[in-house]
């Protein structure tokens, strides 16, 4: 047996014959016993839309002729270009993974070589600069600095004064 | 307009499965069959939603052009009827939404041409049904749509579930609420 609330939920579907055979019987039996639900069913039935009148046949004939012409025209025209569909993600094959790994390894190796080359270049530049800045003074130009206070230091390159 | 017969029966009685079989050899012939089978129902569905013949015809035309360009249309598991009504509903919804936007933008300006209500009303001779249609205009879009699909376009609950892409139980509860609301609005209309 169904309650009034349960019947109320099913009334529209009962009117539309869309319930299961068993439910159709249960709702029908309840309506025979319950005046309140019968009143509600009648009000719903009175509010049922349709059937509506149709467009006259002669008007339809004109419309279908236009529709056929439009479809013929559309069939002759290419469709507007659309964006390619986004391909869904799929698990890559072992070959694709291996290829990607090899490519990555090559890139890393190239980058490391580039870094090493840069470091080597920098080292060479530093060495060269140090060599220039602290170059060894030729023996004939070497003059040791005097530690005797007051004695002037002879500039390099002058002829040594005999002692 | 004479009734077209295919496979020994009126085109209305041709099953979608038969049309799909024909499509394997001749896609255009199958499309023509689909057009003849569904054009009247699609036109009337658009007309009942939009209340304007010109716009309803434009929607009908666009639906079948889209069908022509839909590569899956004749696939074995493709639901032709549900797809046609779903596309029709979506196109009608876009037009209704655009109308609302235009009316908001143009508020205070001279009124634009309204949908051809006179031409639509001319179809009615039943005063009660005219009142029901007027009452339906006061319902939400969801309620209006489901009532139109069931009572004007004569779709079953299962077909409505396919069109709206919802469960069967949702169709039942939504229809129940929509019809209950329609009763309330009809009472309000009667009082006023």
Image: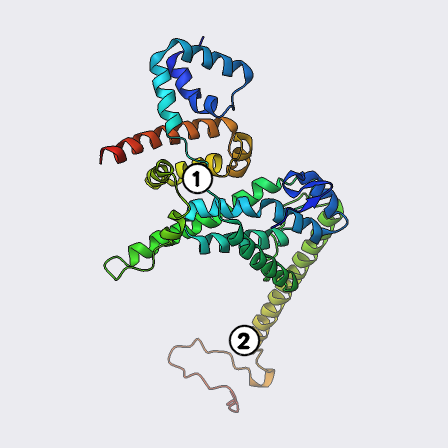
Image coordinates of residue B155 in percent, x first then y, are: 53, 35
Subunit of label 2: A
Q: Nearer the viewer, residue A137 or B97?
A: B97
- Residue named by callout 1: B145
Q: Nearer the viewer, residue B51 or B119?
A: B119
Left or right of A160: which side holds B36? right
Q: Residue B77 appears in which quarter of the rendering?
A: top right
Dot 2: what SS?
loop
Seen in the picture, residue B68 relative to B182 is either above or below; the reply is below
Query: Is there a contact, CB below 8 Å, between mark 1 and mark 2?
Result: no
Residue at image x 38%, y 37%? B129
Give the farthest residue toward the bottom.
Answer: A159
Q: Nearer the viewer, residue A131 or B177?
A: B177
Left or right of B26: which side holds A37? left
Q: Residue A72 appears in which quarter of the rendering?
A: bottom right
Residue at image x 50%, y 16%? A24
Q: Nearer the viewer, residue B22 or B163?
A: B22
């Amino acid at each position: 047996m169904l309650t009034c609330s349960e019947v109320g939920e099913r009334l529209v579907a009962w009117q539309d014959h869309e319930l299961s055979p068993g439910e159709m019987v249960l709702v029908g039996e309840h309506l025979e016993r319950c005046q309140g639900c019968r009143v509600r069913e009648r009000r719903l039935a009175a509010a049922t839309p349709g059937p509506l009148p149709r467009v006259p046949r002669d008007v339809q004939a004109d419309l279908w002729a236009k529709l056929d012409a439009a479809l013929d025209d559309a069939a002759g025209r290419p469709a507007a270009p659309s964006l390619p569909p986004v391909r869904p993600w799929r698990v890559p094959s072992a070959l694709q993974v291996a290829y990607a790994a090899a490519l990555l390894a090559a890139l890393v190796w190239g980058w490391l070589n580039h870094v090493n080359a840069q470091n080597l270049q920098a080292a060479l530049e530093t060495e060269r600069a140090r060599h220039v800045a602290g170059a060894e003074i030729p023996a004939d130009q070497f003059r040791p600095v005097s530690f005797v206070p007051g004695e002037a230091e002879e500039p390099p390159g002058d002829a040594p004064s005999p002692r | 307009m004479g009734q077209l017969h295919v496979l020994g029966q009126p085109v209305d009685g041709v099953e979608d499965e038969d049309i799909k079989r024909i499509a394997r050899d001749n896609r255009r012939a199958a499309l023509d069959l689909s057009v003849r089978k569904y054009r009247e129902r699609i036109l009337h569905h658009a007309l009942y939603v939009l209340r304007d013949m010109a716009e309803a015809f434009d929607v009908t035309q666009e639906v079948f052009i889209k069908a022509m360009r839909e590569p899956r249309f004749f696939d074995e598991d493709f639901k032709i009827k549900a797809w046609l009504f779903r596309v029709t509903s979506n196109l009608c919804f876009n037009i209704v939404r655009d109308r609302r936007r235009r009316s908001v933008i143009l508020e205070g300006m001279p009124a634009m041409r309204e949908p051809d209500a006179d031409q639509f009303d001319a179809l009615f001779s039943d005063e009660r049904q005219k009142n029901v249609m007027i009452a339906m205009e006061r319902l939400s879009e969801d309620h209006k749509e489901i009532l139109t699909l069931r009572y004007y376009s004569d779709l079953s609950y299962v077909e409505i579930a396919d069109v709206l892409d919802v469960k069967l139980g949702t169709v039942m509860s939504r229809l129940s609420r929509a019809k209950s609301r329609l009763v309330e609005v009809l009472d309000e209309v009667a009082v006023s």
